[in-house]
Amino acid sequence: MIRKLLATLVTVTFAALLPSVALADIPTIQNTVVTSSTLATPWLPLSGQSACTVLITGATTITAVPQLTSDTPTNISNGSAVAVTATTIGTGSLTANGTYTGNIAGLALTGFRVNITAISGSTATVTYGCSGAVAGTTQSGGSVTLPFAGNASGVAAGANQSVGLVYYNGTTMDAVRGTAGSVSVQCTSGCSGSVADAPTALAAGVTTTTVIKNVARKLYSVLVTVAGSNALTCYDNASAASGTIILIVPAGSTAGSIVSAPGANGASGITCAGNASNPGVTFFTGT
């Protein structure tokens, strides 16, 4: 009975630390590690969660780095996933006991963990978790169009196609036959009045910082056209590769693969860091 009460108290206490969940279909996920040694905690698989929290207790000296990935489940499970620092959570470096919470919405993420890079003097308890905390305000439904990279139904590369039933056929996005015309959709953000831009291509191996959009834009998806061994990272910035990360194209992404970034918000613009091993990609953006 005492163990059940303690478990209930721990669950209730941590649930109170996480922001309230607005979307019932997005679960709250969490994990706890107790350690006196440096380690990277197991990845928590993300499925639409929009805010994460780290709770540190019992530490004397500690440096804990919250990390995110948009890598594949295979790379996450085998330990080769590319991790980036979640700078929205305690500026990305947690050095004292406390509760740290940050928004991660719109990053097309697949995993969250905490990398404990330094610890001494005591055993620390680190609890970390994520929830669907961004407000799920419902906006009016309507018809929207999204750009695709050409398909077997006769839509030219870069053209817009009314949203219907679509799937990835192994090479391109394709429309399910017999679904001509547009359909009504209900969106949680950014659909009313949205207009798709012409696709923007970025060649493989560009070493300089590249401005994709120098004005506010939403990023919907990225088509990989040439594989690259480096993870392409893009930021909410009109001119520099710095600030809030809104997209990571995982290293080793194959040509023809699509990285989804549904409505990732480039409030200032979209700018990507250069690297000689970056993949070639095409960006699909809109207002």
Image (tube, rainbow, N blue to C red):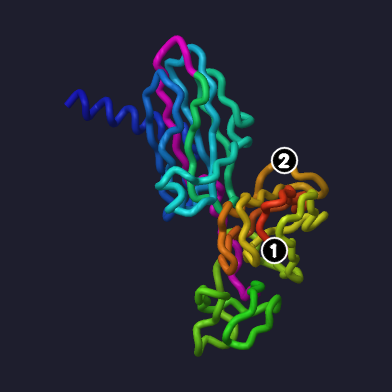
Q: Which residue is mark 2?
A: 243
- Please, what secondary structure does the residue beneath circle 2 have? loop
Point out the tag, 2 or 1, that comes first from the N-terminus. Answer: 2
Amino acid type of disc 1?
Answer: Phe
Image vertical order of residue 133 relative to residue 213, above or below: above
Crowd class of label 1 (few under 14; some 14 to 19; many from 20; radius 10 Å): many
Question: Any magenta on residue 149?
Answer: no
Question: Any magenta on residue 142?
Answer: yes
On screen, residue 26 versus residue 228, left or right, reads left
On screen, residue 186 versus residue 9, left or right, reads right
Q: Quadrant of the C terminus?
A: bottom right
**Residue 77 image offset from top left, x and y in percent:** 40, 47
- Find residue 159 and report its image quarter: bottom right
Point 56% across, 24% down: residue: 94
Q: Which residue is mark 1?
A: 283
Q: Nearer the viewer, residue 37 or 218?
A: 37
Q: Nearer the viewer, residue 267 or 23?
A: 267
Q: CA distance from mark 2 to mark 1?
A: 19 Å
- Residue 261 visible to an observer of this rendering: yes
Q: Quadrant of the N terminus?
A: top left
Extreme-left residue of the structure: 1
**Residue 68 image offset from top left, x and y in percent:** 54, 42
- Please, what secondary structure does the residue beneath circle 1 have? strand
**Residue 11 image offset from top left, x and y in percent:** 34, 33
- Residue 187 visible to an observer of this rendering: no
Crowd class of label 2 (few under 14; some 14 to 19; many from 20; radius 10 Å): few
Amino acid type of disc 2?
Answer: Gly
Point 66% across, 73% down: residue: 147
Please provide the residue range marked out in magenta. Answer: 119-145
Image vertical order of residue 141 relative to residue 37, above or below: below
Point 56% across, 20% down: residue: 95
Q: Nearer the viewer, residue 107 or 80?
A: 80
